[in-house]
Image (cartoon, grey):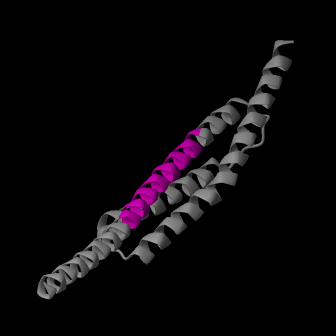
Amino acid sequence: MDIYLTIGLAILIVLLIVALAGALLLRHLNRRTASLKRLLELADRVEADLKSCRARLKQAHAVMSVNPDLPAASEQEAAHAVDAGLRALLQQRIWIRDHAPTASQGELDTAVQAMDQMKERLRPLLDALGEAQNDLDAAMREHIRQDSH
């Protein structure tokens, strides 16, 4: 009877070790999957923000070209800045495609952090652009109102 108890205990210990190893592997894979998902979501948000910025800049330029009384803005400079942001984002997406599958968790965490910082740096610029667009719209309405009287 003691031999069966020893064999049963040994099997139980082996099963516990296998279960623990499986749980740790599953935890690692879940964290990795969550990091990849977050990285791709952030890239999509940054891209949407940059494209929104480009559209707002074009709209602002259209308003300013209609009203020569408004100060001229450096549309070309702003467009180059947005294009540079989109190129940087493309580089990030290429890194994700080429390296993310084999990247360490630390490398993925660093990439997520960098993308999050890029998004946070864009936020005040987009807010300022939105305010400037509102000011331009108000100035344009005022100009139209004055012309109609």
Residue 37 lies within the magenta run? yes
Which contiguous range is marked in magenta?
30-55
Residue 83 in view here: yes
Please tell me whether residue 78 is drawn above or below residue 3 in the rendered image: above
Q: Position of residue 62 (x, y in %)?
A: 63, 33
Q: Residue furthest top?
A: 149
The N terminus appears in which quarter of the rendering? Answer: bottom left
Label tally: 0
Q: Give the quadrant of residue 90.
A: bottom left
Task: Give the residue at x 47% y 71%.
Answer: 109
User: Quick one: quadrant of the C terminus?
Assistant: top right
Q: Position of residue 68 (x, y in %)?
A: 74, 34
Residue 56 point in image, percent of width and height: 61, 39
Q: Nearer the viewer, residue 32 or 140?
A: 32
Residue 31 occupies quadrant: bottom left
| Side (left or right) of 21 relative to 125 | left
Residue at x-position 80% and y-position 30%: 139
- Residue shown at 37% from the left, 63% from the top: 30
Q: Is residue 119 above or below residue 17?
A: above
Q: Is residue 28 magenta?
A: no
Looking at the picture, tell me which residue is in the foreground, 83 or 33: 33
Q: What type of secondary structure mainly makes up the magenta span?
A: helix
**On screen, residue 88 above or below 78:** below
* Residue at 37% in and 61% down: 33
Name the outermost residue toward the front.
1
Q: Position of residue 115 (x, y in %)?
A: 52, 63
Residue 95 seen by the camera: no
